[in-house]
Amino acid sequence: MLESRGVPHQVVAFDPAIRSAVDVALAAGEDPRRVLKTLVVEQDPPGARPLLVMVPAPMELDLRHLAARLGVKRLRVATHTRAEQLTGLKVGGISALALAGRRFPAVIAAEAAAFESVLVSAGERGFDVELSFADLVRLTGARVVPLADAGDYPSSSR
């Protein structure tokens, strides 16, 4: 998709046994804050389409904070099995890029905008793709939402 749309990017390969985004960053020699993990988040009780929430690898997602930002009552992270059922992708390869156009609402942590480019799953275990933050937002239609309290998450750029 990225090539057909002329989006500048670089594929980063790593051991497909790695499941942690922080470990992906270490294997790729990247700042973990530039590597985004994609979490499948459901409204509780379920009913609405699940969200694909992209957050920097070391960031812990505060579901109450996110729910308040989105104006919903309660959220929960899907189990690995449920995430795979909902997306059709394997954990470690769940990607908002791979699911673009499939009506999965996407959210991206505003904190990731501190970096010119970020790495996200390419849709298959063992591969991430580096692309600009702006292209990621545009291609996924992601809503950019601040997820850390002011001062909790240091900024940097690259």
Image (cartoon, rainbow, N blue to C red):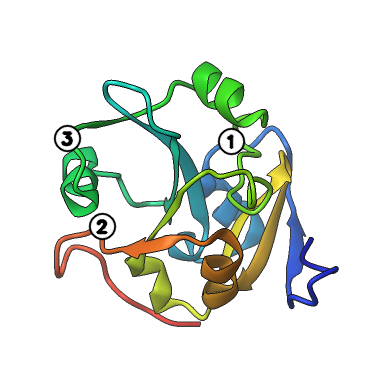
Which dot marks residue 125? Answer: none
Q: Residue at x 74, y 78 (%)?
A: 8
Badge number at residue 73? 3
CA separation, marks 2 and 1?
22 Å
Q: CA distance from mark 3 to mark 2?
A: 16 Å
Callout 3 amino acid = Lys
Quadrant, the N terminus:
bottom right
Image x and y of residue 153, in percent: 25, 65
Q: Is residue 4 above or below residue 106?
A: below
User: Which circle, 3 or 2, is nearer the viewer?
Assistant: 3
Would residue 143 be found to the left or right of residue 139 on screen? left
Image height check: is 103 above or below 73? below
Judge left or right: residue 74 versus residue 140: left
Label 1: few (<14), some (14–19) or many (≥20) C-alpha neighbours in 10 Å? some
**Sooner in the amino-acid sequence: mark 1 or mark 3:** 1
Q: How many marks?
A: 3
The answer to whether 65 is drawn above or below residue 158 in the figure is: above
Q: Which of the two discs, 3 and 2, labels the residue nearer the N terminus?
A: 3
Q: Residue at x 52, y 26 (%)?
A: 83
Residue at 33% over, 51% down = 59
- Residue identified by numbered label 1: 19
Residue 18: image location, x then y, percent: 63, 37
N-terminal of the two: label 2 or label 1? Answer: 1
- Residue at the spot x=18%, y=63% of the render? 152
Say the numbered circle drawn on residue 147: 2
Question: Which of 153 and 15 lies nearest the eye of the viewer?
Answer: 153
